[in-house]
Image: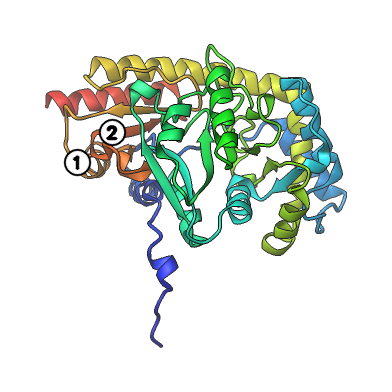
Amino acid sequence: MAFHPSKRVAEIESFKVMDLLKRAKQLDAEGYDVVHMEAGEPDFATAPPIAAAAKAAIDQGLTQYTPAAGIPELRQAISQWYQDKYGLDICPERIIVTTGASSALLMVFSLLAEAGQSFMMADPGYPCNRQFLRFLEAQAQLVAVDAEQNFQLNAELIKQHWQKNTAGVLLASPANPTGAVVHRQEMQAMADQVRALGGSLVVDELYHGLTYGCDAPSVLEVDPDAFVINSFSKYFGMTGWRLGWLVAPAEAAPELEKLAQNLMISPHTVSQYAALAAFRPETLDILEQRKAEFRLRRDLLVSGLRELGFDLPVTPEGAFYVYAGASHLTDNSYDFCWSLLEENHIATTPGLDFGRHRCNEFIRFSYTTGLDRIQLMLDRLQQRISG
């Protein structure tokens, strides 16, 4: 039988970090000691109170479908989280629980972007955003940013690059791959600019809770009509549980729930009951200890890479990534990352995964592994460079 993928699917690019991860796992299986700094996945096991809540849900037979927008208890718990953390009164009906942040992004783009329209976003940025839009017959409007702009859009760039077919702006703070945070004054300026241009503002807040020496404001503090994407994967350490949420204006929530009914049926039931324990004080204590460990890892990695000549003019303030300029070593970071994996057993991610702007100069290092493994990676890099 002849197989002909649709043009839409054929044009969607592979997620290159997953290709590298697949090969790194093969090398692991062959007995090589690979230092994994490629995937954005915390190495800590799920916090015990969360795991215990999941087991209790199974024991109680809580394994059937839930409402498409999530169980009321979890929507209420997330609402309380916004009150406790940001001082915001977010009605639970505005919160849609999703199967990971990916489905939240797909639903928001489905709601806001017509075929042929574009969403403006920073280059570099999270790669799957572009693919979601392509799947919907819309497009990503990439705007090049550098360290001079803290690897983030700003109000002036939004005004300068706005087009007739621009439906809105997607921000990420803290950002993947750069760890860059948008602070309150600039967030306010961008929200005002998008509103003046008649567009929608969507903010990826997946790495909230993982900031070092600063706080990342929620866009909802400055724009109650913005759309927020968040997840239990990063700060809460629940990657494999595939659970996220989005916050939408009240009038948009019913449309998003309709999409959820059709695209997801419902979020993972056991994951939802497990996530109720994510907000308990004993769980938050564990997560804050892990955050402190991430900061130590960041500091070791940043100082070590700078000593090895990598270009890091801005210390990342959040997430668990370092986006390092490697032009002193290569003019093709994609090939270089594969060489590091095959020859030095260091798994990293090339800049090509995150956009087109200066992508051959940059490598993303994910500090989701222990201090001893980071030091081992730095030692191997030193041997490679001096070698």
Residue 125 in sight from this viewpoint: no
| Separation of marks 2 and 1 at Cα, in angstroms | 9 Å
Residue situated in front as seen by the camera: 32 or 335: 335
Label 2 sits on residue: 362
Left or right: residue 65 versus residue 106 is right
Mark with earlier residue (2, 1): 1
Q: Quadrant of the C terminus?
A: top left
Image coordinates of residue 310 in percent, x first then y, are 25, 22
Amino acid carrying label 1: it is Asn
Side of 77 where 129 appears, left or right: left
Pick whichever, 44 or 337, lies toward us: 337
Instruction: Residue at 29%, 20% (x, y): give it.
Output: 305
Residue farthest toward the top in the current orientation of the protein? 213
Q: Residue at x 39, y 43 (%)?
A: 142
Task: Identify which residue, 273 or 114, lies in the foreground.
Answer: 114
Q: Residue at x 54, y 31 (%)?
A: 193
Does 307 appear above or below 180? above
Q: Residues within 10 Å of mark 2 (few under 14, many from 20)?
A: many
Report the disc number at residue 19.
Answer: none
Q: Nearer the viewer, residue 199 or 246?
A: 199
Q: Position of residue 269 (x, y in %)?
A: 77, 51
Residue at numbered disc 1: 332
Which percent across, then down, holds residue 314?
37, 18
Q: Is residue 316 left or right of residue 231?
A: left
Which quarter of the picture shows residue 151?
Answer: top left
